[in-house]
Amino acid sequence: MPSIANADPETDARFMAAAIALARRHLGATQPNPSVGAIVVAPGPVPHVLGRGVTAPGGRPHAEPQALAQAGAAARGATIYSTLEPCSHIGKTPPCVDAIIRAGIARVVVAVLDPDPRVAGRGCRFLREAGVDVSTGVMTAAAEEGLAGFLTHRRLGRPHLTLKLAVSPDGAIGRAGEANVAVTGAAARAAVHAMRAESDAVMVGIGTALADDPRLDVRLDGVIDRKPLRVVIDAEARLPLASRLVRTAPEHPVWVIAGGGAPSARMRALRDAGVHVIEAARDDAGRVSLADALRLLGLYGVMSVLCEGGTELAAALLAHDLVDRVALFEGAIPLGAGAIAAPPSLANRGAGLRERFLLVGARAHGPDRLSTFERRHRDKG
Ligand SMILES: NC(=O)c1ccc[n+]([C@@H]2O[C@H](COP(=O)([O-])OP(=O)(O)OC[C@H]3O[C@@H](n4cnc5c(N)ncnc54)[C@H](OP(=O)(O)O)[C@@H]3O)[C@@H](O)[C@H]2O)c1
């Protein structure tokens, strides 16, 4: 058996951190696969990188074969760091474990075990059976952050949901009868566009679509190829044909999630305009069942959703415990008279979230502040 190099915790953490950063590059672009980072490192007293790979846009090829191809013959006896357990099933590409064994890799370091029942520990087992040294659990929490969409999708059968709202110091998210009221400044808006770029889908309620006529696209310098699915929760299929969303649907997909039995003429008109309309179950109040809407998105392979409001949809998602992360932007300027109140749990710096959510980060974006909350515990299924 080849000698195992680089097996010290500090070196492992350093190269795994690099693989995690690499994976981040294609976050939001690899659906239906997760964005994985892989790095092949040469053995020896001064370990150095021989090859890097990140899941390609569209999900193929996977990270590991790309990193191995870059390393070439030098991969023999080397270590590969992978943010996710290498796959062992034949999907559209041959399994990564085979490529790793064929390349003569001596050691595999994994951050997160794959909960997909087709892999679920088998990847590591096959590698060990082939005489490859395998270490797991390296930088797991950091890697899970980038894999959150994939992990939630596999564990709960629905996308990971981030709720983003901007709230003024007087607890408002907008002003009645006024479109696109700016609650935060340019730096916070750029941060939201970056969040969109890393999401499979961006979602709003029909109230926001009617009030603001948003585009929900990614407008970020240097980013041209990100088109997250745009989703409107719209029980009666009221989204206007003249809206920006419908007018741009042929080149940037828009899905309306209507309630079962929504007016067929409206659904037909939206479909004729290029909108994908799906019908979800209704809740007891006759609204779209949000659990069913997310289940349907999950069935279509959507792994992460950024919900951008408004108040009613945000409050309903929180009430039904369907929110995994909250990105709460707090603006610096009060909105004053005519303000539309944020959901109560988001007022006072998210004080009402504290029971179910943990504050995991706070940072400034220009004059505004972003607080990030993560769901405390969930049955991982
Ligand atoms: N500051 C911010 O971050 C921010 C972000 C977004 C929006 N806004 C502001 O928020 C305002 C719009 O908020 P909003 O509360 O009126 O509208 P909303 O939350 O965007 O949409 C609410 C509508 O969604 C539909 N819906 C369907 N199923 C639902 C369910 N299960 N739960 C909740 N809603 C469901 C309902 O209409 P149907 O029953 O007809 O489907 C409901 O009236 C605008 O003024 C906008 O400018 C602010």
Image: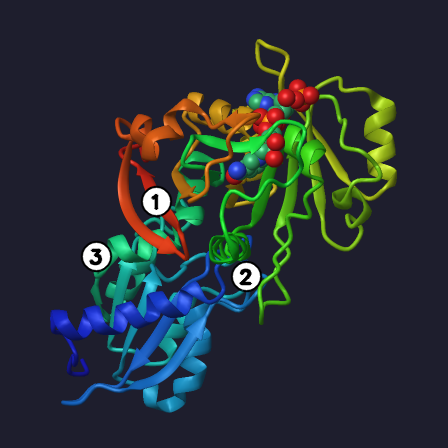
Residue at the disc numbered 2:
59
Q: Check disc 2 and report its element: helix, strand or loop.
A: loop
The quadrant holding residue 211 is top right
Q: Earlier in the sequence, mark 1 or mark 2?
A: 2
Labelled pair 1, 3 in contact (Cβ < 8 Å): no
The numbered mark, 2 or 3, whose residue comes first in the sequence reads 2
Q: Viewer-nearest of labels 1 and 2? A: 1
Query: Is the Cβ of the residue at disc 1 closer than 8 Å to that at disc 2?
Result: no
User: Is residue 196 or residue 14 the one in the foreground?
Assistant: 196
Distance CA(mark 2)–CA(mark 3): 24 Å
Say which of 176 and 97 sits in front.
176
| Secondary structure beneath label 3 | loop
**Residue with the most extreme top position:** 284
User: What residue sits 30% from the left and 49% below the top?
Assistant: 362
Tag 2: Cα neighbours inside 10 Å, few (<14), some, or many (≥20)?
Answer: some
Label 1, on which residue?
Answer: 372
Residue occupying the point 62% across, 17% down = 287
Which residue reaches farthest front? 337
Rendered location of residue 257, percent (x, y): 67, 31
Name which residue type carries label 1. Thr
Q: Quadrant of ligand 1?
A: top right
What is the three-letter code of the residue carrying label 3?
A: Gly
**Residue tagged by mark 3?**
137
